[in-house]
Image (cartoon, grey):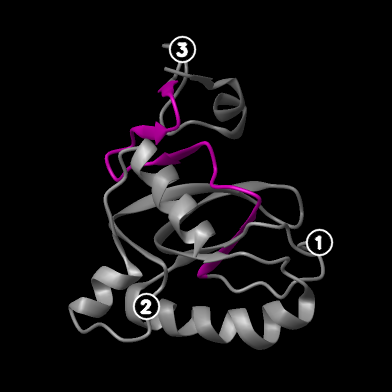
Amino acid sequence: MEYEIRLQIRLREMDIPFETENELRIKGTAKTPDILLSIPLGMRVRKKNNTVEWKTIYWIDSKALFGDVKTHEQSVLPQADKYVHRFGPGLILYWFGHAPLSILREVNDVVIAAWDLPRYFMLPTGDFIGRGTVQLSSNLMYPPTEEDIDKMQVMNT
């Protein structure tokens, strides 16, 4: 529960609107992730071949454990599959890290992250939101390339 609260705090710090698992259950929703985002978010994801792509997420499930292969495949992915069918693509956040992505089974509609939320997300408008103010220098092209994203400066407010 502590890490679900930490996740809620991080999202509130970024002004990202969401509903919690408890709020969804009060509405009568069964099989709920820890967080259902009120708006879809784009998340920059590094793939196994070391390229980068943007993935859209609609929900986040917080795991206060290390994502080992057995737990990931036998417990977490079947649960995530139910969320994908109900809400669309989402994010599994392993707070204590996970096995190398090269040995974890990939599912197209599930993004895997470790230790904390990313510092920034892309909004449906194409704007960026994150901890602190995200500024793009004026000479960057839209949509930003991987190189442009790397030039992005995240300034703490």
**Other-residue count near label 1 (Cα within 10 Å), few / some / many at <14 / 14–19 / ≥20:** few
Which mark identifies residue 32?
2
Q: Which residue is mark 1?
A: 100
Residue interval drawn in magenta: 109-134
Which mark identifies residue 144?
none
Q: Secondary structure at mark 2?
A: loop
**Amino acid residing under circle 2:** Thr
**Amino acid residing under circle 1:** Pro
131 part of magenta stretch: yes
**What's the CA distance linking mark 3 and mark 1?**
36 Å
Q: Secondary structure at mark 1?
A: loop
Which mark identifies residue 139?
3
Q: Secondary structure at mark 3?
A: loop
**Amino acid residing under circle 3:** Asn
Q: Residue furthest left?
A: 27
Q: Is residue 9 above or below residue 33?
A: above
In front: label 2 or label 1: 2
Mark before the other along the chain sequence, 2 or 3: 2
Mark before the other along the chain sequence, 2 or 1: 2
Q: Is residue 11 above or below residue 143?
A: below
Horizontal side of 118 relative to 123 (left or right) equals right
The residue drawn where x is 38% and y is 37% is: 13
